Every structure is written in structure tokens, then in C-alpha cells.
Amino acid sequence: MAVPLHCLQVEDSESDAALVFRLLKKAEFEVHGERVESAEDLRLALSRKQWDVIIADYHLPGFDAYKALSILQETGLDIPFIGISGKVGNEIAAEIMRRGAADYLTKDELVRLVPVIKRELREAEIRRCHRKAEASLQNERERFDSALRCLEEAVITTDANGSVITMNPIAEQITCQAAAKASGKSLSELIHLRHAETNNPLPNPASLLLRGEIEQVSGEAYLIDRQGCEHKIAYGALPVRSERNEIHGTVMVFREIADEERQANNLLSSNRLRSIGVIASEIAHDFSNILSIIMGNIELAQEYCRRKNLAKAMERLDSALKVFNNAKNTAFQLISISQGGKPLLRSMPVGPVICCEARKFLRRADLHHETELPEDLWKCRIDETQISLALDNIFANSRHIITAGGSMHIKAENLKTDAADMPPQIAGDAVRISIIVACPGIEPHRLPRLINADDPACKLSENGLEICSAAAIIKQHGGLLRVEPQAAGIAYFIYIPAVREI
């Protein structure tokens, strides 16, 4: 199959040009040719059409191969230029080749023309592929640089020797080093890391990755910039691998976290203040009611004493004392929520505690109930008094929503550390206590909200003092309380770390 060939000849002899065209056609080229004789014609031909090869006679009247080659080079086009002449010395051939001609032939050796053209076409195609690949690579670099500039994290890339290749503006800002000056320097010269807790020097991430010791490195550290200032950062680094899994370099991404920590602390302080306000409001309301009841009973007792009705007076004083004891329990609950009130732990079975509190509650509540308390429950390190209070608070909270026809299912079970439903907050084995209350027809607004936060006081206004106090007590035991409203009721799940006997 003939190969298309667009051939431009700089030739003043029409017969010589026709001879070259016939020679090319015999070599199975589909020749699309044109002949020019002057510089103006050459410029016009180059601007009008794309050419595969230019064949120029060495000497024309007022024009020669040197000038033709200069015109071609002015255009910046990559077209193989082959000079031809009747006779030419070695010096002239060497000079035109030095100036950029692909080859130079005499007219008595045109047999070499076809192999030369084929060779130059191959090399021109290789150069075009290279230019295309370079242009594509340059576009990728520009897109990559644009992406790096838009990132809020600092990014530094290195080559296989650990030398810096690129840095984005955030990395320049944190390290106090311009990318142009950092390029080519070792990453170990640019950044120095120290452990966030011990302040001991940390190895350079790029060095670890390039040695193949680890596949990735991450953590928190202090970065020391060129001016000796510390920046607390969170960082990660990965190797850059080829298709053959060879390491070609590394990329390190990091960001300053000091501002994030300050914002988190400010938010925590704000939440604590908000929680304190909610707690204070609830306490003021509860104690106002308590004091009103106590005062009312005492006033009635005084009146009965004046009437010398000691039986009624004692009855009112008993009521006041009962309310006073409730107030004392409320105060104990507040201590449990606070930082104080640490439990006195001892290893004991939790089943009897559950059974005792359940019996006390179920005697006062007229509802269908079921209990599952296996004898092989693991022991837990608990403060019996505080766990009893926590269970009592949970039962008291459930009393607010129990309706006619309701039911309660109390279950305790051993839960291994690798159980699928073990909460991540619990380390090791645990005993799970489930209290499921079914209340047909319960209105959703009467149900407590979900509790699984570290600071249950933040949910006080939504869940009541009982649940918040119970959550605080269980947390002090290293456990967790989850309150999960359901379609027709509520579920309380208590997780207490277990003590396995070997």
C-alpha cells in the first residue's frame, strides 16, 4: 500500500524535480509534490500546507540551500530538510548538516534518497510523539500545580533520592522556605520533626519510605521551621510507585492543628458553659419544688401542733422528711455528675444488684415483665451503691413513659471484646444489661433523646436528671449507657467492663 508523502522541492529545474518525483513514486510513495524557486514561494508554500519532507537544490539563481534552510528554521516547523546538488565538497556538506539539514546528497547518488527519506520520516514521527508526550506531561504538571495551590493542606513531593521536587504555597508558608530555593534540597534539610508528646526527634518520613521500611507514615508532631519556630502538625506520607512497584519518590501532606485544637477547646468550653446553665436551671426548679413541699409540710405540722393534734403533725413531718431524703439523693446524683464522687470499686457479680433493683421497681409498677439473668454472668469491678442508684434512676426514667398495657424485658449477658455489637468505647469484655420498655401508643415527644455522648450533661434538658446521673455513674465505672428510643417504647443498654477469672 502506497504511503502518502507531501514533498516540497526547492528546485529551478523542472526536469530534475520530475526525476525526484518519479523516483519516489517507484518506491511506493503516493507523492503529493510541489516545486518552488524563490524565498517568497517557499514561505508561501510553508504557510499554506503541511509538508513531510523538503528537498532543496544546493544552488539556485539568487537562492540557495542555506537560505532555504534558514527560512524553514524561522518558521519553527520540524520538517526534514535534505540538500541535493550536482557536485559538492565535503566541507559544504558538513556545513549544511551542521546548520540543521537532515542529510545532503549528490545527484549521482539519488539511490540513497528513498532510504534517507524513510529514516527521516521515522525520526520525525518519533519527535512528534515526544513533543506530544511532553505537552501532555506539561499539561498534567500545570493541573497538578493548580490543584496543589488550591489545597488547604501543605504538600511536598520528593524524588527517589529524597530531594524536594514541588511544594505548594501552604508548605512554603509553614516551613518558611520558598519552593524555588527548596527544590533539589533534601527533605531532611527542609523540615525537622519532633514527637508531639516526648519532644524527641523523629526520623524523616521520606527516608523511612525510600528505604522500604514501611508503606506509610502518619501522626502528630512538632515541625521546626527555618526560623526555629514550632508548628504542631498532623501529617501523612506515602511512597510514589511505578507500574513495576519501584519507588520513584514520596509525597508528604500535613496541616497545622494548633488552631483546630484551640477551636475545639473553645467549643468545649462553650458547651460546658451551656450545660452548666441548663443544669443550674433544672436544679433551681427541682429544689424550688422540694423546698416548697418541705415548707408546706412544716407549716401544716406547726398548725397541727397548735391544735395539739400530734398524730397529724407527725404525719406532716414524716412527709417533709421523705421529701428531704429525696433532696439528699438528688444532691448525691449531682456529685456523681461532677468530677468528684469517684466509685469505690470491688470485683463482684452484677446480677444480684440488677435483681434487687428490678424487684423494688416492679413492686411499684403494674406491668407485664420478663427477666433473663443467667447465673454465669462475669464479675465486674463496681461500686454496688452507685450502680444501684444508676439502675434506680433508669427505672425511674422509664416510669415517666410507661402506659397501660406496657411491658418490660430485663436481660443481662456476657459480651466478648470482639463481639460485633460491642461499642468502640469499651475495651475488653463486658456485661451488657438491656432494659426494654414497650409502651403501645406512647407519644414520641415523651421519649428521651438518644444518649451516647461523653458528656451526658449536654443532654440534660432533653433526658432528665435521672438518665444524666446514671450515664455519669456508669462512665465512672469505665462503662457506657445508651438510650435508644424505639417505635413503641424505649431501650436502655448498659455496658460495664467485666473481670474474667482465669
Image (cartoon, helix red, strand yellow):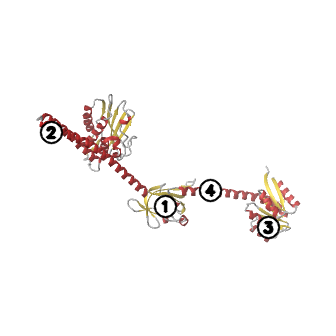
- In the displayed orientation, state which residue is furthest to the right: 15
Q: Which of marks 4 and 3 is nearer the N terminus?
A: 3
Q: What residue type is labelled 2?
A: Gln
Residue identified by numbered label 4: 139
Q: In which quarter of the image is residue 41?
A: bottom right
- Image height of 40 relative to 286, above or below: below
Q: Which of marks 4 and 1 is nearer the N terminus?
A: 4
Closer to the camera, 157 or 206? 157
Q: In this view, does 301 lie to the left or right of 50?
A: left
Q: What residue type is labelled 4?
A: Asn
Q: In this view, does 409 lie to the left or right of 138?
A: left
Residue identified by numbered label 1: 207
Asked if one can make out residue 212 in the rendered structure from this viewpoint, the answer is no
| Label 1 secondary element | helix
Residue 369 placement (x, y as % from top left): 30, 30
Query: From the image, which quarter does the C terminus lie in?
Result: top left
Q: Which residue is drawn at 78% across and 52% down?
A: 4
Asked if one can make out residue 179 in the rendered structure from this viewpoint, the answer is yes
Q: How far apart are marks 4 and 2 (CA)?
A: 95 Å
Q: How far apart are marks 1 and 3 (CA)?
A: 56 Å
Residue identified by numbered label 3: 67
| Label 4 secondary element | helix
Q: Do the residues under discs 1 and 3 have CB atoms within 8 angstroms? A: no
Closer to the camera, 4 or 221? 221
Q: Which of marks 1 and 3 is nearer the N terminus?
A: 3
Q: Which of marks 3 and 2 is nearer the N terminus?
A: 3
Residue 180 placement (x, y as % from top left): 55, 65
